[in-house]
Amino acid sequence: MSRVFGMGCRILRLELPRSRRGIGPGVARLDAYARGAIVLAALISIVGAGAFERAEASAEITVDDVLAARFSPNGDGVRDSTTVLFTPGGTVDSVEVTVTVVRASDDSTWATPLGPALFPIDVPLRQGWGPAPGTAPDGSYRLELFAVDGSAFDTASATVDVVVDTEPPVVELGYAGNPVGPSPFDPAALDPFNRLLVPIRVTGDSTTATTVQIWQDSAAVNVLGVLPGPGEHEFVWDGLASDSSNAPSGAYEVAAIAQDLAGNRDEERQTVRLDRDAPTFVTTGSDTLETTAFPVTLRGAALDDHLVATVEASFDSGGTWVPADTVSAPSDSVSWSVVVADAAPSPGRRSIRVRAIDEFGHTEVSSRIVAYDTSRPMAGATTPIDGDGTYRDGDLVRLLSAWNTSGLSLEADFSNLDSEYSRGDEEVIPLDDGDYRIEYRISPTNSRSGGTKDVEIRATATVLSGTTTISLNLVNAHENELVIVDRNRFDPDAGDEVSIVAESSSASVRVEIYNLAGHQVRTLEGQGLAAWDGRNDAGRGVASGVYLLRIQVEGAEEVRKVAVIRRGGS
C-alpha cells in the first residue's frame, strides 16, 4: 500500500510473508527478506530525500478583482462579458494556468476560456468570458482558476462566482388606473391641477434602479428621483427645473429608465403639458375695423395649450362682459365673433374688448376699434400742375389731387423727395368739387439722391381716411459739384446767411467772395464748411447785388453765384 505525504512523495510499507507452521524453513526466507528490506529501505531513504527537496517548489493564484460579476451576454454592447483579474505566483519562475467555466446548477464544465497556458509569476493578468448571445442560459456560474508549477509537483486554485442575466426589467409609467397626470397642469392652479403625479411600477431583480426624469427638446430638465429595486412608487413634479427656476409652458416628456446590474435596460416615456400661460388671440387684418354702416361683426380666434373655455366681450370700456359667439368651445382653438350695432351712429370710434379664459382661469384681453364715418375718402387722380413731374432741389412742387368729396383734411408726405421735409411743411388749398392743390418747395440743401420718389397723400374725413400715391422724378442738382451752397439768395438784414458745405466734414474749405467789379470783399475758411453773413472783411455789410464765390476744397476749385437782397434796399 502507499500513502501520500506532502507534495506527492509516497512512503512504502512492506508486508513480509509468514509461515503458519512456526519458524522452520521460513526462518531462512525471513532472513533473506530482512536483508532485502534493509537494502530497499536505504534506497528509499535516498530517493525520498530527493523527492522532498523537489516538493519545496509551490504554485499560487490570487484573484484581484472581478469586472461585471453580473452580466448580460445579449449583444447590446453593455456588460456583454465578465472579466476576472488575477495574479499567478509561487516559488518558481512561471506557472501553468487554466480557467474553466462551470455551471453551478449541475457542476458541468461549460467552457474553457483559457488554458492551459504558461505565465510568469507576479504579473497581473485578466481573462474574460463573453459567450455568444443565446448560448449560455441565465444562472450562476463559477470561473475556476488552476495554477500548476513548472515541475507539476504543486497546484493552486481559486473560484469566482458570476451570474448570467439577460432578463430585462419592465417599467410602466402609469398602471392599473393610476395614470400620469393631470396633463396639462399649472403650479399656480388649485389642487389637484397644480402638480404632475408620476406613478411607476417596475418588475425586475433586486439590482434594478429606475431613474425618473423630465425632458424637453432632448435635454433633461429635472430628475424626480430614483426607485431602487422592483416595486411601485409615485413621483411628483412641481413644474420646477433642476435649478429651481420655473419651467416654461410647453410640452415635456416624462422618462422612466430602468437598468439592472447586468446592464439590462427598459425605458418608457409619456408626453405631458405644463400650462402657465393665458390664451393668445389670432387676428386677421387690422385691429381697427372701418365702416360707414352698422351693424358690423368683429371676428378672430383664441388659442391655448389647454382648452379655451369662454370668450367674452365688453363695449366702450364698460365693466360688463357678455358672451361672444363661439365655435367649438371649449377647445384648444376657438373661433369667435362679436356683433357691434348702433341705431343712431355718429362719426367716431368705439372700443371693444374681447377676453379669452382657459380652464385654469388664465385670462387674455384683446382690444379692437370700430371706426365709423358717414363717408370713406376715396382718391381720384393726382397730377403735377407744372411740367412732367421732374424737379430739382429748391424747386416748387405743385400738385392737383382729386377726391370723392369736399371737406377732407389732406396731408402729403414729401420725406422721400426731400431730406429736410417735416410734417406740415406742405400747403394744402381746397378747391371746388373735391379737388385740392398741394404745394411744397424742395430744400436747396436736400441730400436725397436723384431718381423716382413716391409722395403719399392722405385724406381724412371725420374718422375714416384714404390714401393715394404719386411718383415724382428728382434730378440731383448737386451731382459732381464740389460743394453744396444752401441758397442762391439771402437777406443779411433778416439774419440770413449762406452756407458752403463740402462733401467731407474734415475737408479744408476756402471761399473768396468778389463783387461783379472783380473786387474781393471777403475771405472765409473752415473745416468742412464756411458761412457768409453778408459782411466784408472790415465787418461792414455789403450792398445788395450778385456776388461770385470762388470756392477751393482740397486743391479743387469752382465758382458759384449768390445774390444779397436787403429788404431795406441797401
Image (tube, rainbow, N blue to C red):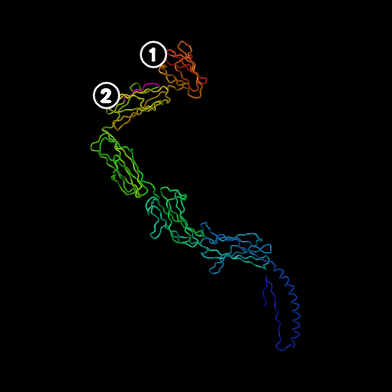
**Res 144 quadrant in image:** bottom right
What kind of residue is marked 2?
A: Asp
Q: Observer-nearest residue: 382 or 418? A: 418
Single out the mark in the foreground, 2 or 1.
Answer: 1
Q: Observer-nearest residue: 311 or 172? A: 311
What kind of residue is marked 1?
A: Gly
**Identity of the residue drawn at 48% across and 16% down:** 550
Q: Residues within 10 Å of mark 1 (few under 14, many from 20)?
A: few
- 476 to 139, vertically: above or below: above
**Secondary structure, magenta segment, majority class:** strand
- Would you say residue 179 is visible in this rendering? yes
**Direction from residue 266 to residue 124 in the image, left or right:** right
Query: Does the magenta segment cover residue 549?
Result: no
Badge 2 is on which residue?
A: 432
Badge 1 is on which residue?
A: 568
**Direction from residue 536 to residue 369 in the image, left or right:** left
